[in-house]
């Protein structure tokens, strides 16, 4: 979802052994527009095993219905 230039989401860490410390989110405009292209954002966070966390990135978009998004990478450390 976007709100006032921020994209907000929630991630669940379903792994029982790893803590997530960073994710890479890609935001892609749904309608083709040469002035707007896919953008990649690295988001620092801390999501222990089997928990969830909200996250947000500063991203001017014009509305949540105009974006597709995906998490393309996750980084972290073994916590158990």
Image (cartoon, grey):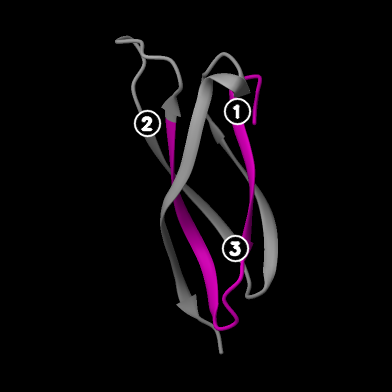
Q: Earlier in the sequence, mark 1 or mark 3?
A: 1
Q: Which residue is mark 1?
A: 6
Q: Quadrant of residue 48?
A: bottom right
Q: CA distance from mark 1 to mark 3?
A: 19 Å
| Residue 77, visible in the rendered structure | yes
User: Does residue 26 show up magenta in the picture?
Assistant: yes
Which secondary structure type mostly characterizes the magenta part of the structure?
strand
Q: CA distance from mark 2 to mark 1?
A: 13 Å
Identify the residue at horizontal 35%, vertical 28% (top origin).
38
Is residue 59 placed above or below 70 in the rendered structure?
above
Q: CA distance from mark 3 to mark 2?
A: 22 Å
Q: Position of residue 80 (x, y in %)?
A: 56, 90
Provide the residue span drawn in magenta. 1-27
Q: Which residue is mark 2?
A: 39
For the residues labelled 3 and 2, say whether their Cβ atoms are less than 8 Å apart. no
Q: Quadrant of residue 12?
A: bottom right
Q: Position of residue 14 (x, y in %)?
A: 61, 71
**Which residue is at the far bottom?**
80
Identify the residue at horizontal 51%, vertical 53% (top origin).
44
Q: Which mark is residue 45?
A: none
Q: Earlier in the sequence, mark 2 or mark 1?
A: 1
């Amino acid at each position: 979802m976007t709100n006032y230039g921020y994209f907000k989401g929630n991630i669940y860490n379903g792994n029982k052994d790893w803590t997530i410390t960073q994710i890479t989110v890609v935001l892609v405009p749904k309608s083709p527009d040469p002035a707007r292209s896919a953008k990649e954002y690295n988001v620092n966070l801390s999501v222990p095993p089997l928990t969830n966390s909200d996250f947000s990135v500063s991203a001017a978009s014009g509305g949540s219905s105009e974006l597709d998004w995906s998490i393309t990478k996750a980084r972290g450390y073994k916590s158990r």
